[in-house]
Amino acid sequence: MQHDPTRVKPPSHLPHPRQVVADLEASRIREVANEGLGREGVLKFWFGESDEVTPAFIREAAIASLQAGETFYAHNLGLPELRDALAAYTDGLHPGRGVAHWQERLAVTSGGVNGLMLASQAIVEAGDEVVVVTPAWPNLVAQPLIMGARVKSVPLKVLASGPRAGAWALDMDALLAAITPATRMLIVNAPNNPTGWTLTAAEQRSILAHCRRTGTWILADEVYERLYFAGDTPNGAASSFLDVAEPEDRVIVAHSFSKSFLMTGWRLGWLVLPAALTAAVGKLIEYNTSCAPVFVQRAATQALLRGAEVTPALVNHLKACRDTLVPLLRGLPGVTLAEPLGGMYAFFRLEGQADCLDTAKRLVREAGLGLAPGSAFSPEAAGWLRWCFASRDRERLTQGVDRLSQWLLAQPR
Ligand code: PMP
C-alpha cells in the first residue's frame, strides 16, 4: 500500500502529477458501476447510500435559506447555530461534559471525507507511518498516502467457527504490535464499511491506552455510529472513542450527515477534535474549502433539531433490511456471512469466486445485479462481495437474491 518508486514514470515532457497521486488506484466499485452503463434494469446495491430521498423538512430548510438570499461565505468552522446544535447532539449521545465543552471541539466539514482528509493534513507528515485497520473504505488508505505517509495495514480476521462464524473480528495483539512509537496515526472505522464489524468499549480502551504509550493519534471514523443494531449500549449507538477518551487525548472523530440523516449528496460532516487542534483545522478549512455552504448548514441544523423524526425510523428500517437480506443470502450455496452489527452492508464470501472484481462485473452483465467487489476494500477481502442493503423497498433485496441464486445455479460445477 505504499508509493512504489520502481513504477515507470510518464515521459518527463508530459505534464504529470506527484507520483503518489499518479499511483492512486482508480475505484473498483466505479469499475463495476461502469459495467452497468447503458444496461436497463440492473438492481444496484454497489454504492454506500440509501435510495431514500432526504426528508422534506430538511430540503425545505435549504430552500428557505436560498430564498432568504443566504448565498455568502461563512465562518471556517461552521455557522454558530449548527455548531450549537452539534454540541447539543454530541452531548446527548455522550453525556457528562456539558454542551459548552463540545462547542470548542467542533469543525464543520464538507462531507465526512473532507473531515478525514483535514485530519490527515493536520497530523501526517510526509514519510510518517500510518496504520489502517482493513478491510476499509478505500479513501481511508488513499488520504494518508496523498500526504506522503507509509501506510501499514492491519487486517481483521475472519472467525472460522462459533455463533459468529464468517464475521470479521479484530486481532488485538496484531493491531497493538503494529502500533509502535514510530506510528504517527491509527485510522480505524467502526462500525465498519464494508464488513459491519464494530468495536467494543473495552477494545477502544485497550487501543487508546496503547496509543497513549506510543504517542500515536487515533483517527476514528464513526460515520456509522448511529446505524447500530445490537441494542446493547445505553444510547443505542455503537460505542465511540468519545466515550472512553479524555478531552486532551490525541483522538479525532469523523462524522457525517450522509448516513444517519439521508444526506449523501449534500456533502456535510464534522470533526470532533481536541480543543487545542480546532483553530489549526479552521486554518486548513480556509485553504481547502473556506467553509461549507450556508444553505446546506441551515438544512443540517434542522436535521439535527428534528433528528428524532429521521434516524430512529431509518435504523429500524435498515435493521429490517438486514434481517430480510442476511437469511436469504445464507440460504444460497457457497455463501458465508455473519450478520453485520452495524452499518448498512452485508459482506459475504462466495466460494469459488476468488476474483471478485470479475465476479461483480459478470453479475452486472449476466444477472443484472450490482454489488461491490471485496478487493476494493483490501487484498484479503478478495473473494468477498459487498451488498448495500439500504433499500427503501425491501422487495428489491429479495429480487436481488433471486437473481444471485439463478446466476449461481447456472455456474459450471
Ligand atoms: N467513512 C466511511 C467509512 C464511509 O463509508 C463514508 C462514505 N461512503 C464516509 C466516511 C464519508 O461519507 P461522506 O463524505 O458522504 O460524509
Image: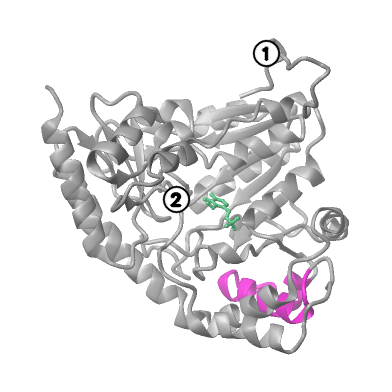
Check the image and report above or below for 329 versus 354: below
Q: CA distance from mark 1 to mark 2?
A: 31 Å
Asked if residue 91 is among those painted magenta in the image, a careful observer would answer yes
Mark with earlier residue (1, 2) = 1
According to the picture, the residue beneath numbered tag 2 turns out to be: 47
* Residues tagged 1 and 2 counted as in contact (Cβ below 8 A): no
Q: Position of residue 392 (x, y in %)?
A: 33, 67
Q: Is residue 351 left or right of residue 114?
A: left
The CB of the residue at mark 2 lies under 8 Å from ligand 1: yes
Q: Position of residue 22 (x, y in %)?
A: 69, 27
Tell me which secondary structure the magenta stretch mostly adopts.
helix
Check the image and report above or below for 290 versus 16: below
Q: Tag 2: Cα neighbours inside 10 Å, few (<14), some, or many (≥20)?
A: some
Q: Is residue 146 left or right of residue 332?
A: right
User: Of the numbered discs in the image, which one, if any, rests on residue 154?
Assistant: none
Check the image and report above or below for 3 versus 377: above
* Residue drawn at point x = 50 percent, y = 63 percent: 259
- For the magenta stretch, what is the residue range? 78-103
Q: Position of residue 147 (x, y in %)?
A: 76, 35
- Residue nearer the viewer, 286 or 7: 7
According to the picture, the residue beneath numbered tag 1 turns out to be: 7
Location of the N terminus (image quadrant): top right
Res 93 → quadrant: bottom right
Res 302 → quadrant: bottom right
* Residue sitting at the far front: 38
> What amino acid is found at the position of numbered circle 1 in the picture?
Arg
